[in-house]
Image (tube, rainbow, N blue to C red):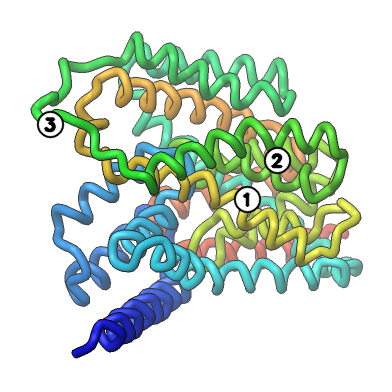
């Protein structure tokens, strides 16, 4: 076969790989209910066991790395699998397939929201806000049990909780996460690490990705401040939120609340209603960002703003995966790095606990019936009732109670 023929054959195989990745992850995006932990199991069953795209060891290494990095864990795992299989275009194909179903649902909800003006519509929205109370309370308890296992980690988290309640400004939250990481690197170190691997496997793609991550992190806020344009403010705010989400998707709640409601782009009711509906759709919770961009009063076309918000919140996590995946075996042997992540995780539990009180409870619970229904939803989630049962049940009960009591 000639050189040109071999190149054509290679290009055809690459396109086939990317298409297969897109289709596989689109199917997963349609059926993956239950949050990141469930997504990890779905990915393993389909991609490791059934398709045999990677080994158990390779999958375990990707999962461990993505659980330690900021960003949407399951989406990062999917992106990393696509990256290993077909390069950056494979990563984009995995992201597009997995994200598209839930993003389209959230955009549709944003489109229908202006029509929600009657008593029934308002009652349904209030039910979704109570769902948010149940879901966030469930997440706070689960994360506290996971990340506050020592006195030191609990102290980091409780300190972050106190500061967040006393100083609810947007700029405080990233500082608390960074501060938690610094304190954790000193207080939460265990052992001396595994230094059996020598040398670092950075390649040009890794270095470029890390440079782009840092440049956007520093440059977008400066450009937004200097330019004063809505698209720069959206890009900067959602990129910053995506870069500081440690410990699970629910941690994005206080960060996005500060970046949107805190700027006056939308009200608490609209924010929490969207968060409630995001629990009912398959795929990544971060598609909530697309909804927020679409409903925010920024002066941009709604779905352009939504798409920009969606890309901005996922981008930092994907850049970090691209830069650190080649050196993960070396990185995991540094005790202070692992301890810093543990400290950041402890701090974000405190941030989410503060958000549970304000704005979640303060904006949704107005009487004993609301408190009972939020508690019922929390209890059902604690006993592992599927969310596709809990959410419509609480919304229906809340709507009925609201209509009966007027």
Q: Where is mark 1, residue-wise?
A: 312
Q: Give residue 256's quadrant in the image.
A: top right
Q: Residue at x 85, y 64 (%)?
A: 301
Residue 60 visible in the displayed image:
yes
| Marks 1,2: beta carbons within 8 A | yes
- The foreground one among 293 and 274 is 293
Name the residue nearer the viewer: 196 or 357: 196
Q: Which mark is residue 342?
A: none
Residue 250, image x and y in percent? Answer: 53, 44
Q: Is tag 2's residue or tag 3's residue first in the polypeptide sequence? A: 3
The residue sitting at 56% across, 59% down in the picture is: 279
- Asked if labels 3 and 2 touch by Cβ distance under 8 angstroms, the answer is no
Residue 237: mark in rendering: 2
- Nearer to us: label 1 or label 3: 3
Quadrant the C terminus occupies: bottom right
Secondary element type, mark 2: helix
Residue 274 falls in image quadrant: bottom right
Kindly tell me whether residue 39 is visible in this rendering. Answer: no
- Counting from the top left corner in percent of width and height, residue 389 is at 50, 67
| 89 displayed left or right of 109 | left
Where is residue 162? Give x, y as percent: 61, 15
Depth check, mark 2 against mark 3: the one in front is 3
Q: CA distance from mark 1 to mark 2?
A: 8 Å
Total numbered labels placed on residues in the image: 3
Between the C-alphas of marks 2 and 3, the distance is: 38 Å
Pointer 3: what residue?
Answer: 197
As measured in the structure, the alpha-carbon distance from the residue carrying label 1 to the one carrying label 3 is 34 Å
Work out whether 233 lies above or below 9: above
Q: Is residue 108 left or right of residue 205?
A: right
Which of the two labelled residues, at mark 1 and mark 3, occupies the earlier sequence position?
A: 3
């Amino acid at each position: 076969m000639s050189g040109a023929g071999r190149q054509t054959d290679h290009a055809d195989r690459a396109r086939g790989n990317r298409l297969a990745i897109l289709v596989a992850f689109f199917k997963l995006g349609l059926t993956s209910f239950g949050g990141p932990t469930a997504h990890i199991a779905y990915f393993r069953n389909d991609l490791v066991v059934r398709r045999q795209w990677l080994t158990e060891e390779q999958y375990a290494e990707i999962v461990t790395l993505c659980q330690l990095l900021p960003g949407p864990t399951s989406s990062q795992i999917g992106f990393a699998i696509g990256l290993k299989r077909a390069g950056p275009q494979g990563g984009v194909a995995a992201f597009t397939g997995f994200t598209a179903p839930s993003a389209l649902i959230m955009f549709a909800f944003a489109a229908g929201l202006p029509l929600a003006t009657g008593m029934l519509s308002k009652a349904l929205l209030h039910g979704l806000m109570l769902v948010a109370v149940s879901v966030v309370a469930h997440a706070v308890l689960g994360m506290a049990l996971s990340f506050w296992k020592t006195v030191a980690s609990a102290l980091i988290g409780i300190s972050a909780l106190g500061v967040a309640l006393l100083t609810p400004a947007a700029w405080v939250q990233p500082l608390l996460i960074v501060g938690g990481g610094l304190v954790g690197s000193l207080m939460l170190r265990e052992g001396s690490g595994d230094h059996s691997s020598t040398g670092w496997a950075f390649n040009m793609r890794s270095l470029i990705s890390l440079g782009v991550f840092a440049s956007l992190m520093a440059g977008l806020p400066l450009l937004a401040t200097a330019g004063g344009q809505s698209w720069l403010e959206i890009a900067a705010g959602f990129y910053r939120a995506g870069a500081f989400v440690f410990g699970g998707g629910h941690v994005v709640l206080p960060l996005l609340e500060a970046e949107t409601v805190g700027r006056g782009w939308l009200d608490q009711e609209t924010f929490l209603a969207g968060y409630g509906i995001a629990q009912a759709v398959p795929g990544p919770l971060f598609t909530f960002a697309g909804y927020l961009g679409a409903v925010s009063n920024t002066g941009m076309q709604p779905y352009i703003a939504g798409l920009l918000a969606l890309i901005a919140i996922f981008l930092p996590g994907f850049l970090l995966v691209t830069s650190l995946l080649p050196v993960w075996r070396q990185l995991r042997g540094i005790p202070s790095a692992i301890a810093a992540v543990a400290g950041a995780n402890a701090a974000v539990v405190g941030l989410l606990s503060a958000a549970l009180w304000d704005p979640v409870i303060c904006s949704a619970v107005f009487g004993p019936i609301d408190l009972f229904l939020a508690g019922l939803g929390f209890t059902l989630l604690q006993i592992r009732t599927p969310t596709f049962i809990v959410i419509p049940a609480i919304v229906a009960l809340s709507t009925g109670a609201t209509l009966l009591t007027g």
